[in-house]
Amino acid sequence: MTLVLANAMLVDPEADTVSAGSLIVKDGKIAGRDSGGEHPSDAEVIDCNGKFLAPGIVDIGVKIGEPGERHKESFRTAGQAAAAGGITTIVTRPDTNPPLDNPETLEFYVRKARAATAVRVRPMATLTKGRQGKEISEIGLLSDAGAVAFSDCDLPVRDARTMTRCLAYAKQFGKLVVGHPQDPDLSANAAATAGSFAFMKGLPAVPPVAERMGLERDLALVEFTGAGYHADQLTVADSISVMERALDAGLDVSAGVSVHHLTLNELDVSDFRTFFKVKPPLRSEEDRQAMVHAVSKGIISVISSMHTPQDEESKRLPFAQAASGAVALETTLPATLRLHHSGDLSLPALFRALSFNPARRLGLNCGRLAVGTPADVILFDPDVPFVLDRFKLKSKSKNTPFDNQLLQGRVLRTFVAGKEIHGSCCGF
């Protein structure tokens, strides 16, 4: 069957262009483009009415509550939220209960994901067993079971010798190691970033240097082993020069940033709303601006949601004791569009960081509008305003810092392999 998405503004992050035209889809793959308005006679034609068509978002670092915390987020609800947010591929974290540290658990996880959701699910597995930082996981067997990368998430491997072995082992299988650059001792139990604001509020804080220390340690080991490494979140300005030097040296490294650290700062927690408690904690406005600049320069190449659902009980606590994390599958696109409307990022640059770069970094054949690639695309209106109501989110958990905030940009339709999974045909 042939599908034509006609009369669209095509956002091509690979070519760095926005152009009027139509996208032709056949057998679930992109078959070509048409700017002349003539379509195959047997095609189903969807008029996009001049709205924007872009590659679906590839989101690295999504937390799913299965197994162990299904009450926070299931595959079904995460898939619905992702589709509504324009995310067609979710790269999930292994910090489940139990963690994804053996092939049997991972194979069960993959089967459950495929049965429950229409979006693509690509899991990461743990770097060490139980995320304890002691014994290396079975990287080869886990790769065969479907793991696309390896990470201990927010538990950095403390022992440098063990981390070196992890990197060397991952390199043998051509797999990416995703690190969380923090010094674990300095960052333990922190709820805010050290500075005058945290001092005035009496919050336990982590100094920004903890991130730079963790990053420099990891990059030194990457240089020694030659492994591929991705820093899941950079959040402080001092880390940017460290990453830039590693890139200039030709190391196989990359860095990401969360939507929250691009669009919020430490002053947003002034009324102690725990929905603003994330990990790492929100930084200064100067740090936020430095992250935006680093994305525009390509030093930070990936923007992710770092979707971390938490239930009401874990958030309705004093700020220092509340759980960290925020849901973001449905808010990542409208929140990052703030950077487009402010003139900081063009639409192609935005989708390079949301779609093209994360797919390329993980070796996934998506995140592009190229002929022959899967037709995982989204139709969106970047200008429509709305006030977010957290209770209307499709995620099970509602812990979003954007509740009651004015956002701009709506996903109108989401397609995976040419099949519409969110939009008018689905009752949305």
Image (cartoon, helix red, strand yellow):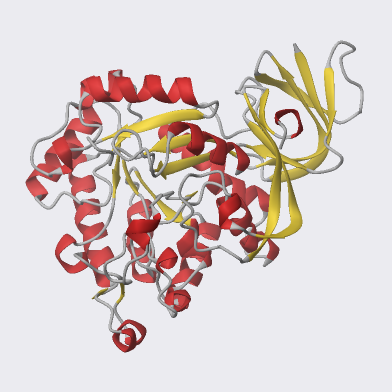
Residue 281 screen position, x and y as percent: 35, 67
Question: In which quadrant will I find the C terminus?
Answer: top right
Residue 413 screen position, x and y as percent: 71, 36
Q: Height in image: 216 above or below 17?
A: below
Residue shown at 55% from the left, 39% from the top: 82
Residue shown at 31% from the left, 33% from the top: 67
Residue toward you, 58 or 349: 58
Q: Is residue 115 left or right of residue 49?
A: left
Q: Is residue 342 left or right of residue 384?
A: left
Q: Height in image: 60 above or below 23?
A: below
Q: Height in image: 362 above or below 238?
A: above
Q: Height in image: 286 above or below 152?
A: below
Residue shown at 76% from the left, 56% from the top: 383
Residue shown at 64% from the left, 57% from the top: 337
- Asked whether the viewer can see residue 131, the reply is yes
Residue toward you, 330 or 38: 330
Question: In which quadrant will I find the N terminus?
Answer: top right
- Asked whether the viewer can see residue 294, the reply is no
Q: Is residue 223 left or right of residue 342?
A: left
| Residue 181, picture quadrant | bottom left
Residue 366 screen position, x and y as percent: 55, 29
Residue 419 screen position, x and y as percent: 67, 22
| Residue 75, picture quadrant | top left
Residue toward you, 89 or 425: 425
